[in-house]
Amino acid sequence: MFGVNAKSQNIVLACKFLDYAMSDECQEMYQWGIEGKSYIVDENGNKKFTEQARDNDWLQQLGINPAFVYPAQQSVASTDELVADWHARINAEIRPYVKDPWPFIYSTEEEAEIINTYFVDIETYVKENATAFITGTKSLDEFNDYLAGLESLNLKQVLEVRQAQYDRFLKAYKGN
C-alpha cells in the first residue's frame, strides 16, 4: 500500500510519482528491466529474459521485481520466465481457474459502520458452521437454519455494502 500524507508539502509531486510508478512504461521496466540488457523481444513480440538475467543476483541489482519496494502490478509473464519450466507449465494450466482477489477499497463512513458492526460476527458464524458441516458435527439437514442465521446477522446489509463498493471500484478502474 502506498499513499500520500495529507500534511506533506509535496502532495502533487508525490501523486505524480505514484502515477508514474503505476504507468505501463515504469511497470515494464520494473518487471523486465532494460531491453537488450535484461530482456529481448522476439519476432512475435514476446519478451524473454537474457541469459545474464537468469542470474537472480544480477537481476536483483537492476532492481527488477523486488517485493514490496515499489508500487507494482503482478506480472505472470515475467515471473514465469524466472521459474522452472515445470512451474510455468503448472501456472498456465491453473491460470483459467485463478480469480482476482477482493480489491482494496476504501469505505465510506456509513459503509465502515455496517461492516464493522456485522462482519466479525458473520465471519465467526461462517467459520464455526463450515467446520461443523465438514466434520459432521452438524447435519446438512440444518443448512436452511444456517442460512436463516446468516440473514439474522444482517448478511444482506453487508452484501449490499460490498456490492456498492465493488461497483464503485469497477467504475473507477474502468475510468467510467
Image: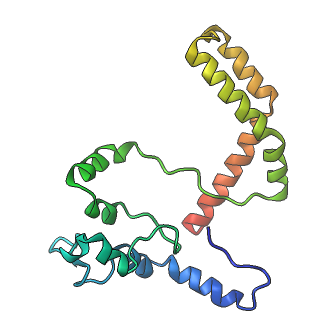
Q: Position of residue 73 (x, y in %)?
A: 47, 67
Name the foreground residue: 106 vs 170. Answer: 106
Q: Residue at 68%, 25% (x, y): give it.
A: 128
Name the foreground residue: 62 vs 25. Answer: 62
Describe residue 143's horizontal placement relative to residue 41 as left or right.
right
Describe residue 44's horizontal placement relative to residue 104 as left or right.
left
Name the foreground residue: 125 vs 43. Answer: 125
- The quarter of the image holding the N terminus is bottom right
Give above or below for 133 relative to 155.
above
Q: Position of residue 138 (x, y in %)?
A: 65, 11
Could you tell me how many numbered marks the image carries? 0
Give above or below for 89 relative to 19.
above
Asked which quadrant contains residue 136, the reply is: top right
- The quarter of the image holding the C terminus is bottom right
Q: How is the image coloured?
A: rainbow
Describe residue 157's horizontal placement relative to residue 70 as left or right.
right
Q: Residue at 70%, 51% (x, y): give it.
A: 164
Q: Residue at 84%, 42% (x, y): give it.
A: 117
Q: Position of residue 80 (x, y in %)?
A: 29, 59
Q: Residue at 42%, 46% (x, y): give it.
A: 98
Q: Position of residue 14 (x, y in %)?
A: 64, 85
For this orientation, the residue located farthest to the front is 57
For this orientation, the residue located farthest to the left is 43
